Image (tube, rainbow, N blue to C red):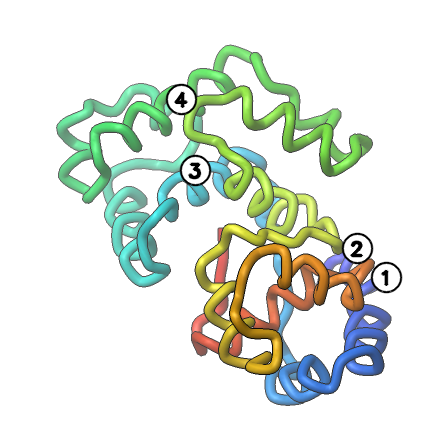
Amino acid sequence: MNELQAVYWALATAQLAEADAVMAGLISHHPHARLHSRGDAFEPLARAITGQQISIKAADTVWQRLRTLTAVNPVAIASQSVEAMRACGYSQRKVEYLQDLARHFADGLVDPSVWPNMADADIIQNLTQIRGIGQWSAEMFLMFNLLRPDVLPVDDIGLQKAFVLHYPDMQPFNKAVLRQYAERWQPWRSVATWYLWRSLDPVAVEY
């Protein structure tokens, strides 16, 4: 566990369990679940693009093929042919997105060193200027790279499914209901989201 997690994870789980009986149960069933930062800024953004609009299993398959093809860094991705990346399972559009992301990093058009000192909303605005990085991808970056503790990715299908499963009294589901209910998870909505994901899949979600 890195220093940031050591500061907030125990406190987060204790407060979530106190505020929400369902969350208390999920936490008790996954006592070793944790968010882990990869440190490098490029890889989680590339993984987020890979995972857009496909299942976790399918995204992992495509990602592993890419890792077999090449190193996952800006220079290597920018130099790959479209055909080679399509053979990994990427759509034409996702290849374009990945290579545009790689060029932003390789050419110094983004500066990850400033992000730790920026507010979540400002980072999202910064990242969504890059082709292929929308709200959801930026939120995954906040959660998995910067380990921001209070992100609620309401557009995430896994989060929506888990919420419907575990909170039947909060139906019919819509995003407004999720946002309102999640107010009790603040300031630990990233952690609550993580446990809801884990309740659906024994394999830890990673971006």
Looking at the rendered structure, the kind of residue marked 1 is Val
What residue would you read off at disc 1?
Answer: 7
Q: Nearer the viewer, residue 132 or 160?
A: 160
Residue 162 vs residue 64, the one in the foreground: 162
Nearest to N terminus: mark 3 or mark 1: 1
| Left or right of residue 105, residue 187 in this image | right
Sooner in the amino-acid sequence: mark 3 or mark 2: 2
The residues bearing labels 3 and 2 have C-alpha atoms spaced at a distance of 23 Å
Question: Does residue 45 appear left or right of residue 153 in this picture?
Answer: left
Label 4 or label 3, whichever lies nearer to me, is 3
Q: Is residue 189 above or below residue 39?
A: below
Q: Which percent across, then down, holds residue 61? A: 26, 56
Distance from Cα at disc 4 to Cα at disc 3: 13 Å
Closer to us: 73 or 172: 172
Mark 2: which amino acid?
Answer: Leu
Contact, CB < 8 Å: mark 4 with mark 1? no
- For marks 4 and 1 on the same chain, the one whose residue lies earlier in the sequence: 1
Upstream in sequence: badge 4 or badge 2: 2
Q: CA distance from mark 4 to mark 1?
A: 35 Å
On residue 37, the disc is none
Please give the label number shown on residue 46. 3
Quarter of the view holding residue 29 = bottom right
On the image, numbered disc 4 is attached to which residue?
A: 75
> At numbered mark 4, what does the secondary structure look like: helix, strand or loop?
helix
Q: Secondary structure at mark 2?
A: helix
Can you say whether 187 is above or below 43 in the image?
below
Quadrant of res 90? top left
Percent of width and height locating residue 74: 43, 25
